[in-house]
Image (tube, rainbow, N blue to C red):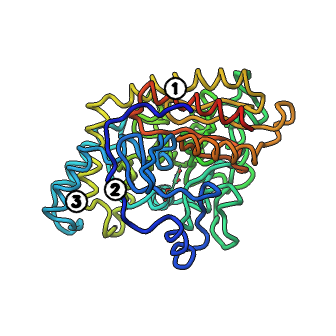
Amino acid sequence: MTELPPFDHEPRPYSGPLADEVLRLRKEFLNPGIFLYYKKPLMLVEGKMQYVWDESGRRYLDALGGIVTISVGHCHPEVVAAAREQNDLLQHATTIYLHPNIAEYAKALAARMPGELKVCYFVNSGSEAIDLALLMARAYTGNYDMIALRNAYHGGNASAMGLTAHHTWKYNVPHSFGVHHAITPDPYRGLWGHDDSNAGRNYAADVKNLIDYATPGRIAGYIAESIQGVGGCVVFPQEYLKHAYEHVRAAGGVCIADEVQAGFGRTGSHYWGFETQGVIPDIVCMAKGIGNGCPLGAVVTTPKIAAALAQRTHFNTFGGNPVVCAQGKAVLEVIDREKLQANSLAMGNRLLAGLERLKEKHNIIGDVRGKGLLLGIELVKDRATKEPARAESAQVLEICRDLGLLVGKGGLYGQTVRFSPPMCISQADADFTLDILDQALGGL
Ligand SMILES: Cc1ncc(COP(=O)(O)O)c(C=O)c1O
């Protein structure tokens, strides 16, 4: 059996309730709509950098990064120290008082943004960031209609659910007023493929088409994940966002980038996912990796758009809490000091090249895609029909887990196996991932 790379950390002995008991409690007392990975649920009780441990002390490589949330490593010592220090001093204050953390953190975040993106709002989750961005777009433009993309995931509150476009996440309640979904710019499954140099322009034409046919011709805005995450790591063709943004701005709308998964250096070549498409949005939504596991989200916009939100008072009790701001600031510093963006690029390229090799060996891999450490392989029953290999993908997850590797799944049918480990992984981790995946695909 392939061994995990050596790692110098002894997990604490676990003395809490066992997994079966936790499952029983969860079934009795928790929301029945939440779902579990794996036939035999996995319980995690400790984490250190790119690894997690179950209650028996078994170690796993977390190649999903807590669903793309652990950016710099589980319980990174500097991030833990920053939160601990602030927890000891003052756990809560709101924006009705001054506090240095929120101000200094906003300055540090704004310094990492291009163009006029200099005004920060802090919230508690990605869904909240999306909701606020939607409010901004409508308040600023005076228009109502929004364009989002099919295959998008933006969150679970009413406004984010309206923008999301997978039936699996959409309850049958009113939630999508004014939202229109353009076709997914997916070079694997869509009309224009990887080999079509006009693909970006052609997919973006659908945004213009929607504006002309489905809206009053003036819109509030357009939102897209810079790489579609939950949708299965869909990377848009070159120049797609550039053309889409032109159509949106010509119709009076603002452009919103959802960087909840792609931001903070994860794409490797750039700090922000939208930069890989050569655009600067008007509003950027962040969450997940921004806090390395704490409930922190943010929206960053221009002073002009922010002014529109000053028409009324705006308040968020926990947004910009001193503890999460300390943690968020530490995350930014660790990304820079440990050169994690460069590591994402190097390790991402290593993984990508290895995944391409696996594609040559395993016919079930229909497509290999992604940037940096946001990667996916789409599994298909047949390369010609592209029928999603749903059950096989679930089986790959099971086999990988048995062999010590945690990966994710995405796509409407769960047909895409996803890799988004903490950005601190080593070459040995990348090679372990490929080796285990090869075994899992071979074991189908
Ligand atoms: C791209 C994207 N946007 C928004 C969200 C919503 O974030 P949260 O779950 O923190 O509300 C998610 C969550 O998976 C996401 O992947």
The kind of secondary structure element at disc 2 is: loop
Q: Nearer the viewer, residue 406 or 140?
A: 406
The answer to whether residue 318 is above or below residue 11 is below
Residue type, numbered disc 2: Pro
| Mark with earlier residue (3, 1) | 3
**Residue bearing mark 2:** 13
In this view, the residue farthest toward the left is 89
Q: Is label 3 within 8 A of ligand 1 (CB to nearest ligand atom)?
A: no
| Mark with earlier residue (2, 3) | 2
The answer to whether residue 75 is above or below residue 94 is above
The kind of secondary structure element at disc 1 is: helix
Specify whether residue 211 is in view. no
The answer to whether residue 330 is above or below residue 166 is above
**Residue bearing mark 3:** 322
Residue type, numbered disc 1: Asp
For the point 73% across and 50% down, the residue is: 413
What is the C-alpha distance between the residues marked 2 and 3?
A: 32 Å
Specify whether residue 196 is in view. yes
Q: Nearer the viewer, residue 77 or 291?
A: 77
**Residue bearing mark 1:** 431
The answer to whether residue 284 is above or below residue 350 is below
Q: Locate residue 315, reporting x and y percent.
A: 32, 68
Q: Is residue 70 left or right of residue 432?
A: left
